[in-house]
Image (spheres, helix red, strand yellow):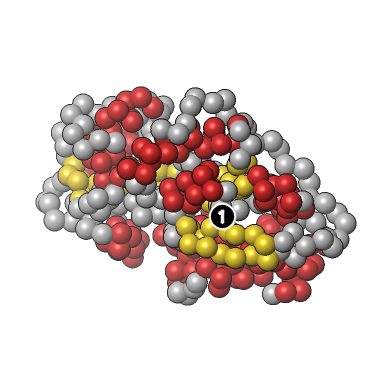
C-alpha cells in the first residue's frame, strides 16, 4: 500500500546486518510540558518530511510549533522510512523523524536506541497503523450480526461483486502493494471462494478509493482491505471487522506476506508501531523542544478527518498544518505549555 512506508529489501538487509539482538528501550511516559515561557532558542533542527500525507502534515505541524513556539531554526528535508532511519542510525541526521513506521527495522533501531544514538519520543499514532477488512458503517448498522470476517462471509449477497453475477466481492489492493499479498492470503485462509466470493482487482489506489466512494453514493455493500489513518476513512465512515482470531505472527510473516504462500493461516493483521524518533544530539540540546516531541501524539480518527479536509481542499502539508492548529487547539495545546501555545497562536 502506498500509505504504509515502502521498504527496499536490499537496504533493509544491509541495515539488519548491523544489528545484534538488543533489549528494547521502552519510551518513558513523557513529563508534562514546562510552564515557564521559553526564552532559549533550540538551534538548527532538521525534520524529515516523509513522502506520505499523514507524515507530511505532521512534519509541518512540528516545524510551525518548534519554530514559533521554541525558537528553533527548522529545516524540512525529504524523507522515507528506510533512507531516513538508516541515515539517522549511521550519520545522526536528520534530527527528527516525526512519523516512523518502525516494525520492519525494529531490531537495528532498538540497538541504536540501546546504544544511545537515537531515542524514541512520543508514539506518533496512539492507535498505531491499522490494517484489515472493512465494511461501510451503514451496512454494519443495518446488520449488527456482522462483527467478524466469518460473519461477513456468511452473506455474500450483501457484497455483490461488480462484474461477477451471484458472487460476493472482496476488494483487493493494487498489484505490487504488500497488502495485495496479505489480502489474497486471507482470502484463501478463510476459504472465501467456497463461500461464494471472488477477489476484485481495483487496479490502483484511486480505484480502491473510488470503489468505496461509489458504494457510499449508492448505499451498497462493500467488503475489502483498507488501512488507517487515511483520508478516505475521514470522508467515509467504515467499520473494521474483527478477524475473529489473534495475530499468528510466525505464520503471517512466514507465509501470508509471501508471493508463493501455499498454506496461509487465519491471522489478524499486526498493528504497525509508529514513533517519533530523534537523534541523541537533539535530545541533548532540545530541552523543552524535545519535551514537546515526547508529548505530541494523536489518534487515527483525528488524522483521518484532517487528511479528508486536505484531500477535499487539495491542501499541502503546510496548509493542513495551519488548518489543524487553527481548528483543533483542544488537541495540540495539550502538547505544549500555555506560554508556547500563545506564541504558536500568535504566529498563525
Task: Establish if 21 lies above or below 155.
Answer: above
Residue 260, given in percent of the width and then of the height, sits at: 18, 34
Q: Residue at x 29, y 36 (%)?
A: 257
The reply to whether residue 256 is in sight is yes
Residue 273, given in percent of the width and then of the height, sits at: 51, 40
Residue 29, given in percent of the width and then of the height, sits at: 71, 38
Q: Is residue 133 left or right of residue 65?
A: left
Q: Residue furthest front?
A: 91
Residue 268, given in percent of the width and then of the height, sits at: 38, 33
Determine the image quadrant of residue 17: top left
Residue bearing the label numbered 1: 94
Question: Judging from the image, what secondary structure is the residue with disc 1 in?
Answer: loop
Instruction: Out of 102 and 313, give the one closest to the viewer.
Output: 102
Instruction: Out of 100 and 158, give the one closest to the viewer.
Output: 100
Is the C terminus in the top left, top right, bottom left or bottom right quadrant? bottom right
> Total marks drawn?
1
Q: Residue at x 42, y 39 (%)?
A: 15
Q: Residue at x 57, y 25 (%)?
A: 23
Determine the image quadrant of residue 207: bottom left
Q: Residue at x 88, y 57 (%)?
A: 36
Instruction: Out of 127 and 90, give the one closest to the viewer.
Output: 90
Task: Establish if 50 lies above or below 343.
Answer: above
Q: Is residue 170 left or right of residue 39?
A: left
Task: Establish if 51 lies above or below 172.
Answer: below
Instruction: Out of 63 and 20, give the one closest to the viewer.
Output: 20
Amino acid at each position: 500500500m502506498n500509505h504504509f512506508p515502502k521498504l527496499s529489501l536490499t537496504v533493509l538487509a544491509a541495515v539488519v546486518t548491523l544489528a545484534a539482538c538488543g533489549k528494547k528501550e521502552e519510551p518513558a511516559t513523557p513529563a508534562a510540558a514546562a510552564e515557564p515561557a521559553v526564552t532559549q532558542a533550540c538551534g538548527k533542527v532538521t525534520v524529515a518530511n516523509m513522502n506520505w500525507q499523514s507524515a507530511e502534515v505532521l512534519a509541518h505541524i512540528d516545524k510551525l510549533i518548534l519554530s514559533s513556539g521554541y525558537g528553533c531554526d527548522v529545516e524540512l528535508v525529504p524523507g522515507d522510512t528506510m533512507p531516513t532511519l538508516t541515515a539517522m542510525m549511521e550519520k545522526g541526521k536528520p534530527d527528527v523523524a516525526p512519523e516512523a513506521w518502525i516494525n520492519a527495522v525494529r531490531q537495528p533501531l532498538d540497538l541504536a536506541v540501546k546504544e544511545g544514538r537515537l531515542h524514541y519520543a512520543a508514539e506518533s499514532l496512539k492507535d498505531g497503523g491499522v490494517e484489515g477488512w472493512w465494511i461501510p458503517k451503514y451496512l454494519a448498522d443495518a446488520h449488527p450480526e456482522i462483527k467478524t470476517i466469518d460473519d461477513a462471509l456468511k452473506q455474500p449477497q450483501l457484497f455483490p461483486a461488480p462484474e461477477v453475477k451471484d458472487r460476493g466481492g472482496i476488494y483487493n489492493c493494487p498489484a505490487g502493494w504488500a497488502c495485495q499479498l496479505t489480502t489474497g492470503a486471507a482470502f484463501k485462509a478463510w476459504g472465501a471462494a467456497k463461500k461464494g466470493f471472488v477477489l476484485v482487482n481495483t487496479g490502483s489506489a484511486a480505484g480502491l478509493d473510488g470503489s468505496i466512494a461509489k458504494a457510499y453514493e449508492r448505499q451498497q455493500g462493500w467488503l475489502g482491505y483498507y488501512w488507517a489513518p487515511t483520508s478516505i476513512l475521514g470522508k467515509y465512515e467504515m467499520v473494521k471487522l474483527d478477524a475473529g482470531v489473534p495475530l499468528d505472527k510466525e505464520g503471517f510473516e512466514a507465509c501470508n506476506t509471501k508471493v508463493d504462500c501455499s498454506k496461509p493461516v487465519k491471522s489478524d493483521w499486526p498493528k504497525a508501531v509508529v514513533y517519533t524518533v530523534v537523534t541523541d544530539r537533539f535530545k541533548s540540546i532540545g530541552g523543552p523542544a524535545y519535551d514537546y516531541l515526547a508529548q505530541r501524539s494523536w489518534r487515527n480518527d483525528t488524522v483521518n478527518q484532517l487528511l479528508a479536509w486536505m484531500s477535499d481542499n487539495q491542501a499541502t502539508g503546510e496548509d493542513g498544518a495551519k488548518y489543524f492548529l487553527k481548528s483543533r487547539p483542544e488537541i495540540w495545546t495539550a502538547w505544549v505549555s500555555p506560554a508556547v501555545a500563545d506564541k504558536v497562536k500568535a504566529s498563525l
